[in-house]
Image (tube, grey):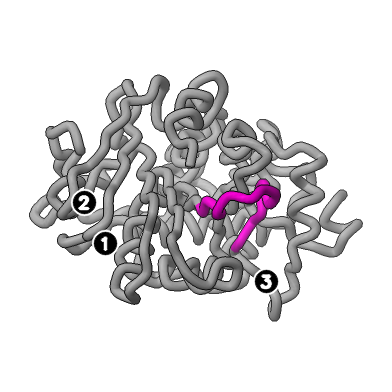
């Protein structure tokens, strides 16, 4: 077992078993003691171009960016960011603004000044947009803001408030994990309801191990970290309203299959081709329509189209 061997609690980055030995080696090289833990994951650190920083969907899984990094080529450094709460011990962030400020601090240790190249997928779209706004307030330039498949949250489009019990939350967290990984966990509200909270977590762990979303015999704090992080991300998602007046250019990559807002998190989805992002920026929004859906756009063969259009 890698965790016992190396004495490390590998983050969610290592879980999604697209992880090759090379990727696990990269992750094991990341310093993970509390003083030097960094949210930066170097998926592809080599190359002479300015680094591209990409924010993942809910729960902070970064390994699913591996194919995109590969198609962008060996000369394009590619870094993804993940939250410390995945260790199951650290407190999750309470807002998109907090996540953005924390990630900015991390990327500025690697690249102290702009122009910055930023991207985000799903929940990471909101984080990337907020990072771009915070950089703009500091007088920095953002050369690219690539938003992957998320409609804008606009004033007056507030989503419904969720009054779910813990079992409903866990069922929907399992659903989000399914959406991001393309695996079927076979978890329902009915199957979880009779179980104690710890037994529910163990059941989720067991199902994730069965479909290779977790290494065998993972610690329960690993699963707790994933659950707490996704739950915090969803609350941050619902309470975030981006400010208008972004001065930079936005590039939106939408999928050809209609965005499925299964959990009702987005409220009203804007109908215009820019999905409402034109209302938040003073510049015209560049829109590319990519084949595939919210998940498969980052997998073969569709990811090749995305990478081609994204070439920095």
The residue drawn where x is 61% and y is 61% is: 40
Nearer-N-terminus badge (1/3): 3
Give me the C-alpha separation between circle 2 and circle 1.
8 Å
Residue 47 included in the magenta stretch of the image:
yes
Residue at horizontal 13%, vertical 50%? 279
Which stretch is magenta?
A: 40-53
Image position, residue 124 (x, y; %):
42, 51
* Residue for badge 2: 153
Residue 117 in percent (x, y) is at 45, 53
Q: Considering depth in this image, is 163 or 74 the residue closer to the camera? A: 74
Classify residue 125 as left or right of residue 103. Answer: left
Q: Which residue is mark 3?
A: 37
Kindly tell me whether residue 259 is visible in this rendering: yes
Residue farthest along the right direction in this orientation: 5
The alpha-carbon separation of the residues under discs 2 and 3 comes to: 32 Å
User: Mark 2 and 1 residues: CB-CB less than 8 Å, in contact?
Assistant: yes
Identify the residue shown where x is 33% and y is 56%: 129
Element at badge 3? loop
Residue 196 visible, this orientation: no
Do labels 2 and 3 touch, CB within 8 Å? no
Q: Which mark is residue 240?
A: 1
Above-or-below relation of 248 to 271: below
As for residue 42 lying within the magenta part, the answer is yes
Question: Quick check: 8 above or below 183?
Answer: below
Q: CA distance from mark 1 to mark 3?
A: 27 Å
């Amino acid at each position: 077992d890698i965790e016992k061997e190396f004495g490390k609690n590998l983050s969610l980055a290592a879980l999604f078993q697209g992880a090759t030995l090379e990727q696990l080696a990269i992750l094991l090289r990341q310093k993970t003691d509390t003083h030097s833990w960094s949210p930066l994951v170097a998926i592809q650190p080599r190359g002479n171009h300015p680094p591209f920083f990409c924010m993942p969907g809910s729960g902070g899984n970064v390994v699913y960016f591996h194919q995109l990094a590969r198609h962008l080529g060996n000369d394009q450094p590619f870094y993804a960011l993940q939250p410390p709460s995945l260790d199951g011990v650290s407190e999750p962030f309470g807002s998109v603004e907090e996540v953005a400020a924390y990630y900015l601090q991390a990327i500025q240790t690697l690249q102290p000044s702009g122009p910055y190249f930023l991207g985000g997928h799903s929940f990471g779209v909101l984080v990337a947009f907020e990072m771009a706004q915070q950089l703009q307030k500091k007088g920095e330039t953002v050369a690219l803001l690539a938003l992957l498949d998320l409609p804008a949250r606009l004033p007056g489009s507030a989503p419904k408030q969720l009054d779910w019990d813990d079992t409903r939350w866990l069922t929907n967290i399992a659903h989000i994990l399914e959406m991001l990984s393309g695996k079927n966990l076979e978890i329902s509200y009915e199957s979880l309801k009779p179980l104690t909270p710890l037994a529910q977590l163990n059941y989720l762990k067991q199902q994730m191990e069965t479909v290779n979303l977790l290494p065998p015999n993972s610690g329960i704090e690993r699963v707790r970290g994933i659950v707490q992080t996704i739950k915090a991300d969803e609350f941050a998602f619902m309470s975030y309203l981006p400010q208008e007046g972004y001065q930079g250019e936005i590039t939106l990559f939408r999928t050809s299959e209609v965005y499925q807002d299964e959990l009702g998190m987005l409220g009203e989805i804007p109908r215009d081709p820019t999905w409402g992002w034109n209302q938040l920026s003073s510049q015209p929004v560049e829109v590319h329509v990519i084949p595939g859906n919210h998940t498969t756009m980052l997998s073969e063969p569709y990811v090749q189209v995305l990478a081609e259009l994204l070439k920095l």
